Image (cartoon, rainbow, N blue to C red):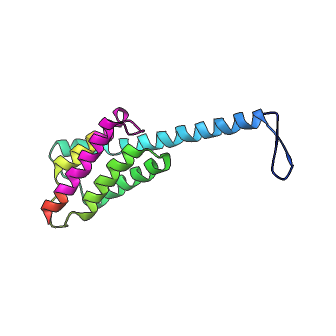
Amino acid sequence: MAKIRTVKKGEYIFDKTRLTKMTSIIEKNQTVCLDTLNQKIRELEPIYEDLRKGKIPSRAPLLDKIQHVNAVSKTLDHIPVSRITNSLQNYLKHLPASTELASSILITHFDALFNRETLNVKLDPPTKMVLTALEALTDHALLTSS
């Protein structure tokens, strides 16, 4: 691949140094994005601990934090985290204001987020089953709350 000709008969000379540099930039940015995703999820830990103690969080701040996690996961194309946070956003946005948040639904979503390393980014069958179950749980909770 020393020389590649274009349709216009221009010449392109393969530059291995430039390719190496671009590859390292991409890898560095991916690491930074993964670190950001992990940081955003770690910010949910105090909420999770409060939930386990029976304290229900306020909807608006929780939704804001979940939206941040969702945005980073979409940037990384991390489908499991995107689907988990989409499901949780759906629950938080569409649950009637008069209905109290169910800690069991929140805890289930948090459990999935905190165990995201076990979920396959390429969506193997067990991962699909977990994500589909979360979405079904949310849909059922929303249907029974109206």
Q: Residue at x 38, y 56 (%)?
A: 67
Q: Is residue 5 magenta?
A: no
Q: Where is residue 119 drawn, in percent x and y? A: 35, 36
Residue 37 found in image quarter: top left
Q: Of residues 145 and 35, which is closer to you in this image?
A: 145
Q: Where is residue 51 drawn, in percent x and y? A: 20, 46
Name the magenta segment's main secondary structure. Answer: helix
Q: Residue at x 38, y 35 (%)?
A: 120
Q: Where is residue 103 drawn, in percent x and y? A: 17, 49
Q: Where is residue 127 drawn, in percent x and y? A: 32, 38
Task: Establish if 48 lies above or below 56.
Answer: above
Q: Of residues 68 and 120, which is closer to you in this image?
A: 120
Task: Establish if 118 lies above or below 78.
Answer: above
Q: Is residue 116 magenta?
A: yes
Task: Establish if 76 lies above or below 138.
Answer: above
Quadrant for the N terminus in the image: top right
Quadrant for the C terminus in the image: bottom left
Q: Which stretch appears magenta?
A: 112-140
- Residue 146 visible here: yes
Q: Residue at x 79, y 36 (%)?
A: 15
Left or right of 60? Residue 98 is left
